[in-house]
Each structure stands twice: as C-alpha cells, then as structure tokens.
Amino acid sequence: MGQKILLCCFTVIFLAAVRCGPLLAATYDILPEEGAGSLGHALESAEDGDSIIVHGGHYLGNVVLDKAVSLIGLDNPILDGGGKGDVLTVLVDSVTIQGFIVQGSGRSLEQANAGIRLKSARQALISDCQIMDNLFGIYLDRSSGNTIADNEIRGLWYERDTETSGHASDGTGDSHFFKGEIGDGIHLFAASENILNNNTISQTRDGIYFNYAHANQTMGNQISEVRYGIHFMYSDDNLFHGNMLTNNTAGAALMFSKRIRLENNVFAYSRGFRAYGLLFATCDYSVAEGNILMDNTRGIFFDTSRHNVFRGNLFYRNDVGLDLISSASHNLFIQNNFIDNLQQVAMPAGRVGDDNLFYEEGCGNYWDDYRGFDLDRDGVGDIAHKTGDPFTFLMARSPAVRLFLNSPAAAALEFSERMFPVVNLPKVEDPYPLTDPVKMEALEAVFSQNPAMARVGSERFADKRPLAGCSFLMLITAFAIYMWASSVRCNRVFKRISDFVKERVGTNG
Amino acid sequence: MDHNQGTPREPAVGGRAGFCWGRMLSVAKKEMLDSIRSRWLIIFAVVFAILALIISGLGMSGLGLAGYEGFNRVTAGLLNLVLYLLPLISLVMGASSIAGEREGGSLHVLLTQPIHTSEIVIGKFVGLSLSLTTAVLTGFGGAGLIMALGSGLMNVKDYVVFVLLAVVLVLVFLSLAILISVLASKRSQALGLGIFVWFALILVYDFMAIGVASLSAAGAVVPLLLLLLLFNPADMVRVLVILQLGGEATFGPTLAALTRTVSHGAGQWLLLGALLVWIAAPLALACLFFGRKQDY
C-alpha cells in the first residue's frame, strides 16, 4: 500500500515536472570560477523563459542569445568581447538583459561592432547596464518595440582624446576631437516604436542616431560630449521629451525627418565655431515646445525646413538665438522667450524667408530688448518689435566688426537707427511682442524629476557667498579710503574719545 | 601736511630736488579732502551706485526658472555705464584739477612751498584716483551685494576682474586728464579738451575702427585691429572685460586668432602692459611739462 502511494506520488511529481517544465522557468546560476564557457553551456541548455543569473566576475568571449531568456547580472559581471565582433548579440524576441558591464567590442566600422546588438529582435528589455569601451554602445538592427532604460554608455573618445591631444588644439576651437572610427551611443537602424529612457551617454560619435527609425519615444536621457546628441535621419513621428544635451557639437540634428516632437529638453553649452543647440535641416512639420536653448554658439540653425512650430521655448544666452536661412519657410515662432542672446535672430541671407511668422492671432514672443510700451495693459506691446540694428547687420556682413560688441559706438549706432530709420535693414517683425516672459511650467515638472537638469541654468552661480563677501569688501575698502582722506575729522573724533577716556581715568585715579 | 611740519623748511628752489612720498601723499590727501568737501565724491558715488543697482535689478527676467536671468543684459549695461561714465567723470575731474587751481590762484601758493612739481602732479593724480576708486567701489559693491542677495547673477572672479578693469580705466583717463590740465592755460579750455578727448576715444575712434573692421580682407584686418586696440584704452578694457565674462568664443570665429592672442600668455601681458603705459606715459609727460613750465 505504502509502495503504491509512493509510486503515485512519484508519478504525479514526474508528470508535473514534464508538463510544467516549460512553464516553471528554470534558473541557472553562473559563477566566474566555472569559466566563461559555463555561460555558453547554460545558454545551450536553457529554454525560452528561463533566467540566467550571472554573478560578478569577468566573462571573456562573444555571447549570442538565441533563446528568450532573462540574463540578469548580479554584482556587475563584466562581459568582455575581447576586441572582436559584437559582445552580446540578441537574435530572438522578449529577451531581458540587466545589470551588466559590457565592454570590448570589435573596432570595425564596416561591421558596426557593438556592445549589445539586437538583430530583428522585439520586446527586449535592456536596463541598468554600463556599456563602455565599445565602438557602438547598443545597435538596434531592424528591431522594434524594445525598451532601453537606465543604461550608462561611454564611448571611445576619452582614450582617443588623450592619445591625440597634440592634435586636439588645432585652432578650430572645437572642444572635442573627432575621428571617424567611433560609433554611436545607441544606433537605431530601421527600428521603430522603441522606448529609450533615462540613459546616460557620453563621449561617443552621436548620442542616439535614428536612421529610418519611426515613432520612437526618447525620454529623460542625458547626453554630453558627443558630436550630435540626437541625430534623426529619415526618421518620422518621434517623440523627444525631457532630455538634457550638454557640451555637444550639436544638441540635436534633425535631418530629412517629419513630425518630430521636441518637448521640455535642455540644449546647452554647444560651443565652438560650428556648434548648434538644435539643427534643423530639411525637417518638416515638427513641433518644439518648452525647450531651453542655452549658452550655445547658435541656438537653432534652420536650413530648408518648412512648416515647423516653435512654441514656448527659451532662447537664453546664445551668441545667435535663431539662425534663419532664407531657404526655411512657413515656420511659426510664438510665445518664445528671447533673453540675453547677443543676437536674437540672424538672417545670413538678408531676408526672413517666406512666411516665417513670429506671431499668431495677436500673440507674439517675448524679446528682452523690446523697448516699447503697453498702455492698455493687455500684456502685448503696443508697437511692433523689430530685431536687428545696424551693428548686428554690419556684424553679419563682416564678422570682424564683432570686436566692437557692447561698445558705446555700437549702442550709439543702434540708438541713432531707432531715432532716424534711414537705412533699410532686414528685420524680423513681431507686431505683438509680449511684455512679460512666457512662464515655462511644464519644464518645472521635468526639473523636479531631474535635478541635474535644473542645475544647468544656475551652474555658474552656485555659491552666492563669495560675491556677497567680495562686494562687502569693496564697500569696506571704499569706506577705509574715505576715512583715511578725511582723517582730520577722524583724528578729532579719536581725540575727543581719548580725552573723554583720560578724563574718566583721571577722575577715577 | 603733518610731514611738512616735521621737516625743516628748505628754500623753494632747493626743495624741488628729490621726490618725497610724504609730500606727494599730502597733496593727494588734500585733493581727496577737497572732493569730499565739495560733495561731488558723495554725489558721484551715489549716482553711480544707483545706476548700477538699477541695471542689475532690471536684469531679473521674471521667468520663474532659477538661473535664467538676463546676465548679458546686466553685464552689457554695467559695461556701458563704465565705458561712458567713468572716462567722462575722470576727464572732467582731472582736467579741472591743476588748471582750476591755477586759475583760482591756489597753485601759486602751493608752489611757494618746498615741494617738487612732480609731487604736485602725481599727488593730484593719486588723490583723484583714490576718490574715483572710492566711488566706483561703492557703486559696484552695492550692486554686487544686491546681485548676491537676489539671483547671484555673476561669478565672483568675473566680477572682481570687471571692477579692477574699471579702476584701471579710471586711472588711464585720469592720467590723460592731468596731462590736459597741465597743458591747458585755462580751466574752461582744459574741460573742453577733456570732453573732446572723451568724444574722440569713446565714440569717434570706435566708429572709424568699425569702418576698418568691415573691410573685407580678414587677413589684413586682424593685425590692424590689434593695433587699433592698443591705441585705445577704452577698447582694451572693453575687450578684456568681455573676454573675462563671455569667453573667447564671444567674438566669433573670424576674430579667433585675435582673441586667442589677447587672452593667452604674451598677448594678455601685451594688453595689460599697454594699459600700464597708458597710465604711466601721460603722467610722466605731465610731470615733464609741468616742471618746465615757467608761467604758472
């Protein structure tokens, strides 16, 4: 009887094991002592849906995922391609890769060697990986619907910079030294509907390169020290929200693409003689809202782009806020803040371009150099604002004139032109200039999630105490000089005090 | 004054042999006392401070985002205030100093004292420099405090360099003014000459230089511009301030060679040296001419 029960039990367990085997996913533990081959063995024997937990250590060799497994790294295991091919190749859908350090891909640009390559893979999740020292960071090859989040990607520039530091200062003024043999942080080729969130990318060629990649969502990434932070090529309907792009040659380069939405991003510190915060080249029907373009050589550069809308952006402290080439047409700029740009709008061709409008339905932009008035207090200035004065006009014609920036002569030229508008200069006209800056509320929400982004504007002035101290010292110095000069009176005061003291001491004694 | 009381009074002719710091400082102190008594120092300091405060106060953009205030507007405004007002005040004050005393007759009395002519010239220069520096420091100190309490618009190093360069500008134009004052025979003549120099150096010179800069041949323009810079102290101060505040990219790619030269190593010293020459040379000439002059 007992044996029967035991047999029954065994049968049940056996049946359960056989039937539920694929459902109850197996978990494989990989330890570094077992050698790099153990990972390959585990992958061979694993079934779809299994988890492979890789413990901290160094695993040399290229890994190919051809089963829908979850590859989880514990204590930052290092996957090292050893300088050959792609480090990690994904060939199937629904793979999870988490918590690895991926390094040492091949260096062949022809094969586009990458840290992680997705080949026609869907629904993959790649997160919390550090992808360093690879030609390309992550390469999405005809792979759609994937999620790439919270990764840190650093390219090869650092070592190249130090290697070639002798050539780096070649007098062009570019802050980075570019060389062809560098890949992008994340490269999407014909890969659509992916989600790219909260990644940190630096020192690659382009931060994220979209090539024939449509309807992707890119949010909360931080991209710095690359060529183009974001590069759209023939990629339509992409959303780009809450990203921070600093110290790049161009924050974002939008080329041959349509219907791109740029919302609440910060494009800052793109400095150099060919640097742009945002570059529009043959990019149509796009919308940019609530972005900050700060401290760039050119805020936005426009070339042959049509039917774009710019609403509620801040152009702040750029050398040129908006560089409008006349081949751009039918663009609308409203409710933007133009603050503190050396030149608010530049028109290299000498004209504004067809139907580029700076107002719509009685609402224009905020210009901090607007010198009109608002008698009816409706928030819209009563006389039109026209950008451009003779000095900026001269500056555009012969750049050497720029040496006389902020000079009294330049101010006098501007003043005289306003009083006696004899010369006919090309100007952007805004008939409804706003008297107060447009509030950027949506950005505040983004800033609260990303403190690094909030710091961009106030970085220069982090600590106010030295300024206060220095100013106080100046006042003290001024006072001291004053007292020294009028020391005749001062002596008299001192004498009176000392006499008084002597008297008191004398009477006491 | 105390120093003169201590030393035995030598005959006027023999007393002019050596340069004495004490006597020079006495003249300087007297000059400062005059400017304090005549209230213009206080008035100028207050006006300068109010203007600086207005400019730094208006820079706040009211955007609601911390850090995105009108930094360039403030610095451009302060720079223009410095470039217009300080040379003008320096020239007017300096030009009327010696010429004014000569017209008033007090210079005769001063020259009967055992005091060297160069001590008078340099004493006047130092006294006026100290008065104007006091005014500038008061103005900038107040504005700096407001900025620090408000938005902290400026980096402390940039601000200090800005103020120092403003003081240098004062010294340069005071030195020029003293030379004018020595050369002119009447106070009104000195004042007219001073205002003419202000107009020429601040406006006319720049207009002409802008004309030169808009020549198309960039290769020839850059060395020419450097030369033009060296011959105008106001332009030098402006360029140095902008380079300090905005960095060398501010002047654009065409002038990269020039701004690099001027903001690094030898070029920087060249500009500072030129400014020093601008302070020392007119003053030395003034001493020379004042010593040679017979008809006071």
Image (cartoon, rainbow, N blue to C red):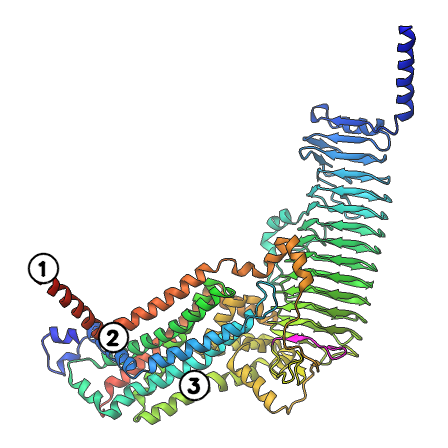
Q: Chain of mark 2?
A: A
Q: Residue at x 60, y 49 (%)?
A: A162
The image shows residue A435, relative to residue A9, as above or below, that is below
Left or right relative to A377: residue B183: left
Residue name at image x 63 percent, y 85 percent: A375
State the residue position of label 3: B198
Q: Secondary structure at mark 2?
A: loop
How far is the residue under mark 3 from the one under mark 1? 63 Å
> In the drawing, what numbered circle is on residue A508?
1
Tell me whether marks 2 and 3 sit on the same chain: no
Instruction: Tell me the mark number nearer the camera, choosing from 3 and 1.
Output: 1
State the image quarter where residue A331 is shown.
bottom right
For badge 2, the amino acid type reads Ser
Instruction: Give the dominant element type of the magenta stretch: helix, strand or loop.
Output: loop
Q: Is residue A361 magenta?
A: yes
B94, B281: nearer the viewer: B94
Mark 1: which secondary structure? Answer: helix
Label 2 sits on residue: A486
Disc tally is 3
- Can you give x and y, in whole percent of width and height, for residue B71 in the image? 55, 69
Q: Mark 3 — on which chain does it sit? A: B
Q: Residue B147 vs residue A239: left or right?
A: left
Amino acid type of the residue that numbered disc 1 sits on in the rendered structure: Asn
Q: What's drawn in magenta, residue-wise? A: A358-368
> Which quarter of the picture shows residue B118?
bottom left
Indicate left or right for B238 with A119 as reference: left
Label 3 SS: helix
Distance (Cα) linking label 2 and label 3: 30 Å
Q: Nearer the viewer, mark 2 or mark 1?
A: 1
Q: Earlier in the sequence, mark 2 or mark 1?
A: 2
